[in-house]
Amino acid sequence: MTGVEIRQAVLEILERIAPDEDLSNLDDAIAFRDQMELDSMDFLDIVMELRKGYRVQIPEEDYHNLNSMQSTVEYLTPKLKDVPVAG
Amino acid sequence: MSRYSAQPSAADLLWKKNTLALDDRIVITGIGLASPNGNNLAEFRQNLLDGKSGVVDYETRYMPPVLAGVCNFDELRYQKRKEVRRGTRAGSIAVYCSNEAVVDSGLDWNSVEKNRVGVYLGITEHGNVETENEIYEISQFGYDTKVWSHHHNPRTVANNPAGEVTLSLGVTGPHLTIGAACAAGNAGFIQALQMLRLGECDVAIAGGVSESIHTFGIFASFQSQGALATHEDPARASRPFDTQRNGIVVAEGGGICTVERLTDALARGAKIYAEIIGHAMNSDASDFVLPNSTRQAECVHLALSRAGISANDVDIVSSHATATEQGDIEEAKALKAVFDGTRTAINNTKSFIGHAMGAAGALELLGNLPSFDDGIAHATINLENPDSRCALPNLVANEPRNLGEVNCILNNSFGMLGINSVVIVKKYES
């Protein structure tokens, strides 16, 4: 998966776990929590969806890398580079 | 003279002196419900009078198609999509019904002290839906428990449905779900009455809910027990007291009320649907699943005694009968033991919607309350070949019956492990 494809995958996860949010103006450089209503359970949903959809294991000490879209894509790019888009 | 007339007789005054203070009188002031054949009381009542069933064909995991009572209320009326996703079906039903009841009650919710509100909801079971879902989910990942949801625990704790109501309505008083098998709907009202009398709350949000159609296990277990209804016409599948019955139609739903002390209701000029004048719960102590007519009759007698009335004072009995052979026969025995020789009409709601489990007792009481206004007892439908072993003289068969005036309703709800509950309500007249 490319960075663009990973961004799209993460966006689709956010749409599922926060279905009331308008994500059309999501700023990739700003923390998710500063522009969406996300709590710790929602954050764990992101981790779980990545685990289920892409078999990527994210250790707890790495959770800070999922702070924003930009940092998430940067963190996931090497982990998902050999994973097909379909996940 | 009525017990509640403006100028009580000496006998009335003696009754009041020997029984309850005015503060102890408990009334229903708001109603919210989700039934397979109606999403509010007016719709539900009309469909009961029109003989309209809410039973439909239904798909559940692992099993061939079954029949079920399925609700279609607007989940998003009081919840965001995220809240629906995060919570449970029982929680969504409870949130919908509770909000509807509060709106109907006319309470100025913003000014209600939320720490003086209690939430008491009966349930038959809770957690099976989520557990089955999670086991299915990990089965798709080679039973890797790392994909087991972190939402599982908050969804399956037994207080979940009542807890979701507190989150929705900002209630900071006590909340409980009352696990009482299929006696649970009545148990919710009884708990509310007791907590109001104890002064534990000033407003109770009470009743029962069920999400049971979303667990295949309940269908499979009834099937293994030989107690799951089948019929080519879903509307004719639930057949209490009929020789052609072949079991239970499982349903989901909720029936929830605002319940208050009479004094509080009068002070704010509330509409009063009914006064709860009697209640009882007891246990069979005889079998895991088989009912016990002797204990059921004792439960009814105890409720009548507490209400200070006789069987002949009851205008309508809302029967529990589920369309299992033994269940119908035992309840008929109990009802004959208490009501033989009276004019009391007997009806049944499960014939329309199936067995709504934890919600059954609540829905079955609420669907009868409009009788206080229209004097009509709705029927038990699908009674084409009455079982002589369940012969009840005043069973309202297939068509509603105009009783002229209805002042008192007795509601039976019984459940597995031999749990029995009875609630008696009376028309309130100032």
Image (spheres, coloured by chain):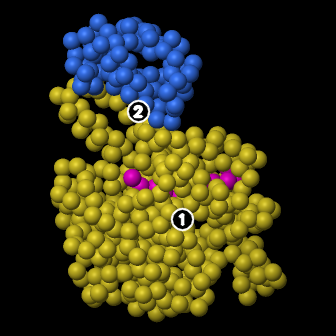
- Amino acid type, mark 2: Arg
Mark 1 secondary-structure assignment: loop
Q: Main secondary structure of the magenta part?
A: strand
Q: Nearer the viewer, residue B21 or B318?
A: B318
Q: Indicate the position of residue B28 as horizontal and vertical percent values.
A: 64, 65
Give chain B's shade.
yellow
Q: Residue at x 29, y 76 (%)?
A: B236
Please check whether the numbered discs 1 and 2 fall on a single chain.
no
Magenta part of the protein: which range?
B200-211
Q: Indicate the position of residue B138 as horizontal and vertical percent values.
A: 24, 32
Identify the mark at residue A16; answer none if there is no mark. Answer: 2
Chain of the residue displaying label 1: B
Asked if residue B113 shows in the view, the reply is yes
Q: Indicate the position of residue B365 as horizontal and vertical percent values.
A: 51, 70
Query: How many angstroms separate mark 1 from mark 2 (CA)?
Result: 31 Å
Q: Nearer the viewer, residue B10 or B232?
A: B232
Q: Residue at x 29, y 36 (%)?
A: B134
Q: Indicate the position of residue B78 as horizontal and vertical percent values.
A: 56, 48
Q: Residue at x 74, y 65 (%)?
A: B270
Mark 1 vs mark 2: give the one in front. 2
- Amino acid type, mark 1: Asn
